[in-house]
Image (tube, rainbow, N blue to C red):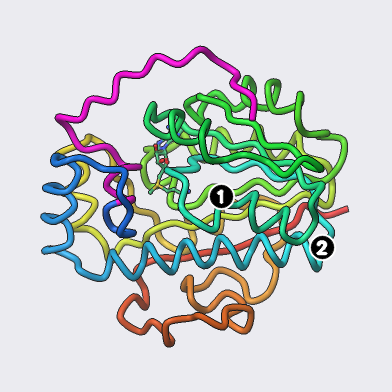
Amino acid sequence: MTDEKAPSVDLRTDEPHPARVYDFYLGGKDHYGADREFGQRVLSICPQLRPLARANRRFLARSVAVLARDHGVRQFMDLGTGLPTSPNLHEVAQGAAAESRVVYVDNDPIVLTHARALLTSRPEGATAYIDSDVVDIDRIMEQAAKTLDFARPVAVSALALFHFLPDPKPAELLDRLRDRLAPGSFLTISHVLPALQDVADAYQGTMGMGTLRDRDEITALFGDFELLEPGLVDPFDWRPDLDPAEEGPGYEIVGLGAVGVARKPD
Ligand SMILES: C[S@@+](CC[C@H](N)C(=O)[O-])C[C@H]1O[C@@H](n2cnc3c(N)ncnc32)[C@H](O)[C@@H]1O
């Protein structure tokens, strides 16, 4: 684990933060009263957020396993990583291939603090952490190049991230990112859908962030990358065969979120 920037840790525990509220949904321990209070209010509007968050984490594990095992990917860059939650991306990737190299990116100080302690690599591979707003994608890639070789394929993931960024930020940063990735690279995205309008309103009202996009808008974020089967689908529908622990079909979250993995053509 390397740090790319000196930490300036001001956790602001008096106000909710997206990473900690998400940790609350997942049943983690790294959140504070303000996060719980806001999270409980959101769950009273939409109790399905809890199974949706869990399904999102399981999609992360399955998609990384597929990329590592079936597509031979050994380099990963995860945008908007969130608080460490087992299994973390590097654990899945290095479980498939110990030499896998992973760069994590987030702009939340508590994520930085925990990432340093917990996102530690196997000796054969590497993990690095970049403390940055994802909109600074050029600087992120410059720093990530100390750990990853961008002349070779890299799988970039942005899970449950872009609904925190207003338009046109995701499209702008992804245009620059996709251009600079080698052919055979991958882009993995998960995103909530317009059915969660009340939730987005609550996030906008309290944190000033929450942008919903429909399936066409999410598909557009992949640009000219080609979606792998089964396309852009509900989280539990992406290769469910690989998840023996899948908690049933997940019908209570149908139409609330969309996930997909796409490949840069040769
Ligand atoms: C809901 S969590 C998702 C965590 C993880 N990707 C997952 O899907 O399990 C969203 C994460 O995105 C981070 N985030 C939000 N806006 C960001 C930005 N502009 N730059 C970097 N990270 C950001 C938050 O700090 C939080 O950790």
Res 205 visible: no
Mark 2 and mark 1 residues within 8 Å of each other at the beta carbon: no
Range covered by the magenta-colored residues: 1-23
In reply to whether residue 187 is colored magenta, the answer given is no
Q: Residues within 10 Å of mark 1 (few under 14, many from 20)?
A: some
Give me the C-alpha separation between circle 2 and circle 1: 22 Å
The mark nearer the N terminus, 2 or 1, is: 2
Please state if 114 lies on the left or on the right of 153 as rendered: left
| Above/below status of 113 relative to 89 | above
Q: Residues within 10 Å of mark 2 (few under 14, many from 20)?
A: few
Element assignment for label 1: helix
Q: Residue at x 43, y 86 (%)?
A: 249
Q: Is 250 or 224 nearer to us in this picture?
A: 250
Q: Which mark is residue 143?
A: none
What residue is shown with label 1? 221
Q: Residue at x 65, y 49 (%)?
A: 90
Res. 145 image quadrant: top right
What residue is shown with label 2? 71
